[in-house]
């Protein structure tokens, strides 16, 4: 019996050591500890492993301090080991608060809307850790400071005309040179309804045009977007703002002026509706050939030959008031009333490059044609209208036009 009790006690001691080694105290009576084997210097209760404390939340603000942010990119906050309770972002110079939104899991936040160029923002983040305690983190974010900001102007200007003709190109002009044309072109879009194939052509470092492969379809709606804000246009120049414009295309009014027959046929949506006698440029001042697009319309203007180099005292000089004027190039070419050349209209070309019409025909033409309508000139003896001469866009073949894109 004594041997049996000693075995039972030893077995209990061994069981206690094993349980202590596992760090588990469940089911062991305190009296049983008296016979347990415990290493010298350790208390079996006081020195048991303690539970780890819950970690504090870690807040990440993007971008890191010292990295300039593009103002079209949002400030972002992310929290690990916790959730976002509130984020306060303020422009330090103006005091203006920045709006933002939490992510669905409340572990992140992102600003909404564009930020300002060259600004510093104070960012304060209130977060709650997994232990339920509140924590606060402060930081700053700065945005890039451009050397120049390029403003995109539209031609025709938004709301300047109710509708445009089928020949109207879309023009974007910048007030500063664009070094990275590809970046600018990627930020420009034209959507046409119905859909029509089109493309951009750079006239210069400050001007780019868009036209379809053929004239616009009558009744089209054109939406132009210049998403330029925050776009790096090269050499320290950034886009100043975003802009949008919508244009409506009216009937297809196309005039075909033939210098050989000294007549002009008028077509409305492809149907011949009128024929007029004309006089084009004389052999010394031949009219440019090719499609011309009407870019301006005035009841009367003062025409001065000195604007193209023939000034007072020189042969061919003139300065006089002319009525019913529709500009078809910046080289001084118009369709206008010319009562002084009625005798030559229909039989000889005597103008300084304009399309001369009798007063009654000029009035009819003025009443029916407008911005974006087309005047195609043939057999004038002159050179083709240059692509850069508002608007020589249609002088180029489609492959030539596509080659003018930066993309």
Image (cartoon, grey):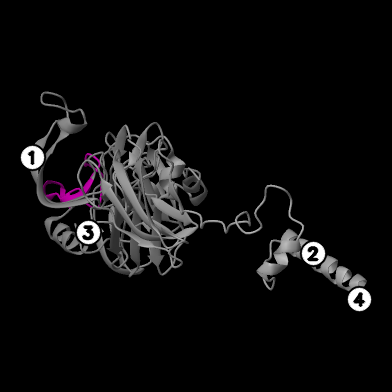
N-terminal of the two: label 1 or label 2?
2
Spot occupied by residue 173 in the image (x, y as percentages of width and height): 30, 43
**Tag 1, which secondary structure?**
strand
**Tag 2, which secondary structure?**
helix
Left or right of 244 in this view: 16? right
Any mark on residue 336, and which? none
N-terminal of the two: label 2 or label 3?
2
Task: Find out whether residue 351 is within the magenta segment.
Answer: yes
Left or right of 92 in this view: 74? right
- Asked if the residues shown at circle 1 and circle 2 are in contact, with their CB atoms under 8 angstroms apart, the answer is no
Residue position for label 3: 370
Q: Residues under labels 1 and 4: Cα distance? A: 142 Å
Residue position for label 4: 1
Question: What count of labels does the image hold?
Answer: 4
* Quadrant occupied by the N terminus: bottom right
- Asked if the residues shown at circle 4 and circle 3 are in contact, with their CB atoms under 8 angstroms apart, the answer is no
**Tag 4, which secondary structure?**
loop
Q: Quadrant of residue 392?
A: top left
Q: Residues under labels 4 and 2: Cα distance? A: 19 Å
Residue position for label 2: 13
In this rendering, the label closer to the viewer, 4 or 2? 4
In this rendering, the label closer to the viewer, 1 or 2? 2
N-terminal of the two: label 1 or label 4?
4
Classed neighbour count for the residue bearing mark 4: other residues with Cα under 10 Å, few (<14), some (14–19), many (≥20): few
| Residue interval drawn in magenta | 334-355
Spot occupied by residue 183 in the image (x, y as percentages of width and height): 44, 43
Residue position for label 1: 320
Spot occupied by residue 20 in the image (x, y as percentages of width and height): 72, 61
N-terminal of the two: label 1 or label 3?
1
Q: In the image shown, does 77 or 298 lie closer to the viewer?
A: 77
Residue 183 lies, with reference to residue 170, above or below; the image says: above
């Amino acid at each position: 019996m004594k041997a049996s009790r000693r075995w039972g006690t030893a077995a209990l001691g061994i069981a206690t050591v094993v349980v202590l080694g596992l760090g588990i105290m469940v089911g062991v009576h305190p009296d049983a500890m008296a016979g347990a084997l415990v290493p010298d210097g350790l208390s079996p209760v006081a020195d048991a492993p303690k539970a780890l404390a819950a970690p504090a939340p870690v807040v990440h603000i993007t971008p890191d301090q010292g990295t300039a942010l593009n103002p079209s990119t949002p400030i972002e906050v992310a929290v690990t080991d916790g959730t976002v309770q509130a984020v306060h972002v303020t422009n330090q110079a103006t005091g203006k608060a920045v709006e933002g939104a939490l992510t669905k899991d409340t572990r992140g936040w992102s600003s909404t809307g564009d930020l300002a160029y060259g600004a510093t923002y104070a960012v304060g983040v209130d977060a709650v850790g997994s232990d339920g305690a509140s924590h606060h983190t402060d930081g700053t974010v700065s945005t890039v400071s451009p050397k120049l900001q390029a403003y995109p102007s539209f031609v025709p200007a938004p709301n300047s005309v109710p509708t445009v003709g089928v020949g109207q190109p879309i023009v974007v002009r910048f007030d500063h040179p664009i070094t990275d044309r590809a970046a600018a072109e990627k930020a420009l879009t034209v959507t046409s309804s119905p859909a029509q194939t089109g493309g951009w052509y750079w006239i210069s470092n400050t001007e780019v045009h868009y036209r379809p492969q053929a004239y616009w379809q009558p009744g089209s709606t054109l939406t132009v977007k210049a998403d330029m804000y925050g776009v790096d246009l090269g050499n320290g120049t950034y886009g100043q703002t975003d802009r949008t414009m919508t244009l409506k295309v009216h009937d297809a009014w196309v005039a075909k002026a033939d210098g050989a027959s000294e007549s002009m046929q008028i077509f409305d949506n492809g149907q011949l509706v009128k024929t007029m006698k004309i006089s084009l440029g004389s052999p010394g001042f031949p009219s440019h050939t090719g499609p011309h697009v009407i870019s301006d319309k005035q009841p009367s203007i003062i025409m001065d030959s000195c604007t193209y180099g023939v000034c007072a005292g020189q042969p061919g000089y003139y300065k006089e008031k002319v009525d019913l004027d529709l500009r078809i190039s910046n080289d001084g070419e118009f369709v206008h009333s010319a009562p002084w050349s009625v005798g030559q209209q229909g039989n000889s070309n005597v103008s300084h490059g304009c399309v001369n019409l009798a007063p009654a025909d000029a009035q009819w033409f003025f009443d029916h044609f407008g911005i974006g309508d087309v005047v195609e000139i043939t057999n004038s003896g002159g050179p083709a209208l240059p692509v850069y001469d508002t608007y020589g866009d249609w002088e180029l073949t489609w492959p030539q036009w596509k080659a003018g894109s930066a993309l």
